[in-house]
Image (cartoon, helix red, strand yellow):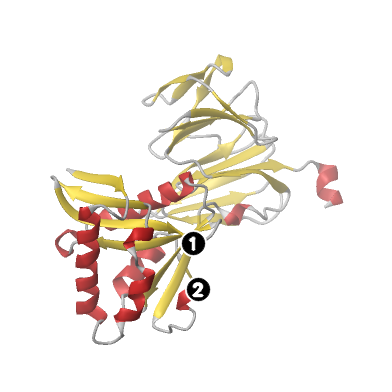
Amino acid sequence: MTEFKRTDGKDKDFIENCRLLDMDLDRRVGKKIQRDKYKQYNRLDEIRQAIVVYENGKAIGGGAIRRYDDENVELKRVFVHTAYQGKGIGSRLVFLLIEWAKELGYQRIILETGELLAESCAVYKKLGFQVIPNYGAYVNMPESLCMARDLYNRDLCDMKGWEVTVKRAIGGLEWVGFSQKHPEKLLCISSQKITVLDCGNGDITESKAEYDEENHIAVCAALPDEEIMIAGQYGGKMEQASVQGDKVLIETSPDHITTVTFVPASGASRVIFQNYGYYTCGFSCDGTYFMFAQDAGITVLRKLCAHERSRG
């Protein structure tokens, strides 16, 4: 059984994992670059959020995030013991650290690795990270390679004929569903709380709800007298074609990369997502709102009416 435990930089198992990471780096790249200069940037006493991975009670890996500035958090000290690599544990670990970063309100996660660490670079790219100019202390270190991943979906922010009304990170997001009676209301069920989001103004109301994960139906105290169809990463399906003629096409490859293409009622189609971590997306019953959910949170867009589009 694999367990992921939240802790901090003082945890003895996390400290031991970092020691093993340094030994592994010394073995792999220590003869090619001078690694001592990196020690000052890996101080464990500055780490407040760390995760240790256990397999049947034995520590087999870990990683951490550390505040960089108000909007950016840095991924640090990610390592899975050699015998347990290639099993998806590292990817799951990074996803959980991303979830934690979202809970803390950060907008982007950044990291430093090295071009000599080809396997690590490949994994990060599969998880949605992109190469960026070296930042901070790494600016004058050509052997360093810096990467970043947004914690919300930027590709939706410039959709012609639509405007973003809500962009929010939701840690532990499980299910979402539009109200039929109030199309601007979106029920959001996470592992932490249940809320109703007003897609028009972004207001959030906490509520109580009961939901059936097999039949994908929920009833919510804040939205009485209706059953709400819910969808999420593990099931259900939202409206993928609107009454106004817009639609989305969703395809998932054998290696679990999901491609979402937005097909407007008029105009050119465009890919709005191509990555891991897709949950669900769909339109409100009146076609006014489009909601996209992924592991980075949710983005809601409102369709502009004709005079708004002409004015823009």
Q: Is residue 24 visible?
A: yes
Identity of the residue drawn at 73% across and 49% down: 161
Identity of the residue drawn at 65% across and 32% down: 203
Left or right: residue 193 versus residue 21 is: right
Whether residues under marks 1 and 2 lie with C-beta atoms below 8 angstroms apart, the answer is yes
Left or right: residue 301 versus residue 114 is: right
> Which residue is label 1 attached to?
68
Please tell me which residue lies in front, 56 or 215: 56
Binning the other alpha carbons within 10 Å of mark 2 as few (below 14), some (14 to 19) or many (20 upward) gives: few
Q: Position of residue 122 (x, y in %)?
A: 35, 69
Q: Position of residue 59 (x, y in %)?
A: 17, 52
Q: Amino acid at mark 1?
A: Tyr
Q: Position of residue 259 (x, y in %)?
A: 48, 54
> Which residue is label 2 attached to?
136
Q: Amino acid at mark 2?
A: Gly
Identity of the residue drawn at 35% across and 56% down: 64
Q: Is residue 88 visible?
A: no
| Image quarter of the N terminus | top left
138 lies above or below 238: below
Left or right: residue 248 versus residue 62 is: right
The circle drawn on residue 118 is none
Q: Position of residue 307 (x, y in %)?
A: 85, 44
